[in-house]
Image (cartoon, helix red, strand yellow):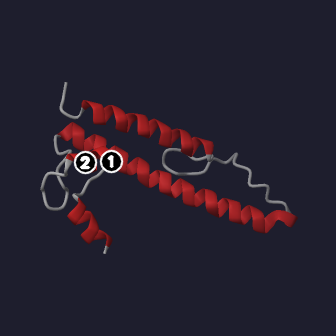
Amino acid sequence: MGAYDAIDARLREEREQVVHQLSELGASESGDLRDDVDFGEGFADAASATAERTEILGLVESLKRSLEDIDQALARIADGTYGTCANCGKVIPAARLEFRPSSTYCVDCKTAKAL
């Protein structure tokens, strides 16, 4: 068993949940909406349908980014670079990885990147 087997399993479970949420919103893993999604775009409800579509697209985009982060973390576990900051190369503290297993950056680099 590898050092990150528990995190790998957790990430795979999170991935399944994100894919399920995308499906519930009518989107594929790539974030594309299926053709059968109905926003009830009748004339009287056009503004409401547009608002609903905008909200769903925002949620889909957020879930898509989460899925990308999870996939990157799984790839880093597979190639042996998991737990190392992609920017500075320092070890990402275990507490950060426990809180957010898909972390790619240490706190300092993530904070600097956000600015």
Circle 2: residue type:
Ala
Q: Which residue is mark 1?
A: 99
Residue depicted at x 82% and y 63%: 45
Query: Residue 15: in sight, yes or no?
Result: yes
- Say few, some or many: other residues with alpha carbon within 10 Å of mark 1 (under 14 / 14 to 19 / 20 or more): few
Q: Position of residue 31 (x, y in %)?
A: 52, 51
Query: Residue 101: in sight, yes or no?
Result: no
Left or right, residue 112 beside residue 23: left
Front residue of 80/31: it is 80
Q: Are marks 1 and 2 in contact (CB under 8 Å)?
A: yes
| Residue closest to the far front | 95
Q: In the figure, residue 71 lies in which quadrant?
A: top left
Q: Secondary structure at mark 1?
A: helix
Residue depicted at x 25% and y 30%: 5
User: Which disc, if any, is residue 95?
Assistant: 2
Q: Position of residue 72 (x, y in %)?
A: 31, 47
* Quarter in which the C terminus is drawn: bottom left
Q: In the figure, residue 60 lies in which quadrant?
A: bottom right
* Quarter in which the N terminus is drawn: top left
Residue depicted at x 55% and y 51%: 32
Does 93 appear above or below 8?
A: below
Q: Position of residue 43 (x, y in %)?
A: 86, 65
Does 107 appear above or below 91?
A: below
Left or right, residue 3 beside residue 34: left
- Say few, some or many: other residues with alpha carbon within 10 Å of mark 2 (under 14 / 14 to 19 / 20 or more): few
Residue depicted at x 22% and y 35%: 4
- The CA distance from mark 1 to mark 2 is 6 Å
Circle 1: residue type:
Phe
Left or right, residue 54 beside residue 74: right
